[in-house]
Image (cartoon, grey):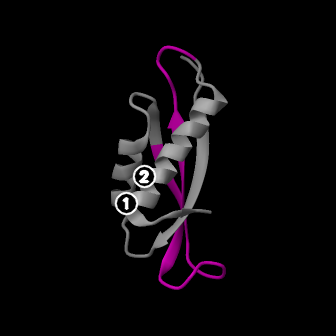
Amino acid sequence: TLPAIQRDIAVVLDRQVPWCDMEVAIRAAAPAGLLESVQFFDLYEGKGIPAGKKSIAFSITLRSPERTLTSDEADKAVQAVVSSLSQKFQAVQR
C-alpha cells in the first residue's frame, strides 16, 4: 500500500450550512480517485468567529493507487476543495 497524505482544513461559513452538504462538495471537488476519506473533527462558534457563522474543521486523506503523491499534489487538492466550498457556501479558509 502506498503512503497517504492527510491535510487538515478549517473554514468559516454560515451557521446554517449542514456538514452533509459540505461533505458532498468536498468529495466532488477532490481530484478523481485520490480522495480516500473525509473526516469532520471540529465545530467552533464563539470568540473570533462572526455572528451567524461557524468554523468547521475536517481532514482529508489522499492516496493514489499507482504512485506516491507529492506534497504539491496534496496542496492542489486542498486548494480545489477550499475553492469549491468558497463558491458553493462563501466559505473562507481559516
Please indicate, yes or no, whether residue 60 appears anywhere in the rendered image.
no
Question: Which stretch appears magenta?
Answer: 38-67
Please indicate, yes or no, whether residue 2 appears anywhere in the rendered image.
yes
Residue under the image location 37 percent in, 75 percent down = 16
Q: Residue 37 in the image: x percent, y percent? A: 45, 39
Is residue 75 rendered to the left or right of residue 83? right
Magenta span includes 45:
yes
Label drawn at residue 17:
none
**Figure check: 72 above or below 59:** above
- What is the secondary structure assignment of the residue under circle 1? helix
Q: Residue 23 in the image: x percent, y percent? A: 39, 52
* The N terminus lies in quadrant: top right
Which residue is denoted by mark 1 in the rendering?
A: 88
**Figure check: 78 above or below 10:** above
Residue under the image location 60 percent in, 49 percent down = 8
Which residue is denoted by mark 2 in the rendering?
A: 84
